Image (cartoon, helix red, strand yellow):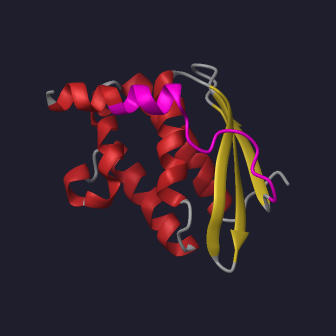
Amino acid sequence: MSFDELYQSILLDHYQHPRNAGPVHGATCSIHDHNPICGDEITVAMQIENGKVAKVGFDGKGCAISVASASMMTEQLQGKKIEDAKQDVESFLSIMRNEDEFDNHPEFEELASLEGVKKLHARIKCATLSWNTAKRLLEGDSDS
């Protein structure tokens, strides 16, 4: 299996079997956002306890890239200290802006499957919607 096939397999798996999709019971904050260009919508919810992201989940509708990225985002942030989660979000967004590379972040393993999205400018917003929404939550913005 080539790297491209492996990455496509990872994206497809997260799209078809999204991790942490649905409501987060006991969520302490949540925020809704959308991409007006393509219509993707997402609500990201977190349960913050003792300075950590105890639980994180998402709900909404979107394309395969949007859902897969949100699924991987929840796995990346869950259980992390807030400052570490903020750093992961900033690093991911920096990579998607071509200011950094996945090779510098071995902790992003499966997220590297989104490398090809950087070549498709119209799809970058799909891949970053959940991350930008999580960033707002981690900075204290919340609908609830």
Number of marks in picture:
0
Spot occupied by residue 72 in the image (x, y as percentages of width and height): 47, 44
Quadrant of the rendered structure where residue 61 is? top right
Look at the image and tell me whether residue 74 can be seen: yes
Q: Residue at x 54, y 40 (%)?
A: 70
Look at the image and tell me whether residue 101 can be seen: no
Q: Which residues are magenta?
A: 10-26
Question: Is 15 covered by the magenta stretch?
Answer: yes
Q: Is residue 7 above or below residue 73?
A: above
Spot occupied by residue 89 in the image (x, y as percentages of width and height): 47, 57
**Left or right: where 54 falls relative to 75:** right
Spot occupied by residue 24 in the image (x, y as percentages of width and height): 75, 50
Q: Quadrant of the N terminus?
A: top left
**Left or right: where 30 falls relative to 102:** right
Q: Residue at x 50, y 52 (%)?
A: 75
Spot occupied by residue 60 in the image (x, y as percentages of width and height): 69, 31
Q: Residue at x 48, y 71 (%)?
A: 84
Q: Residue at x 17, y 32 (%)?
A: 3
Q: Quadrant of the C terminus?
A: bottom right
**Could you say which is closer to the camera, residue 7 or residue 44?**
7
Quadrant of the rendered structure where residue 88 is? bottom left
Q: Is residue 65 above or below residue 76?
A: above
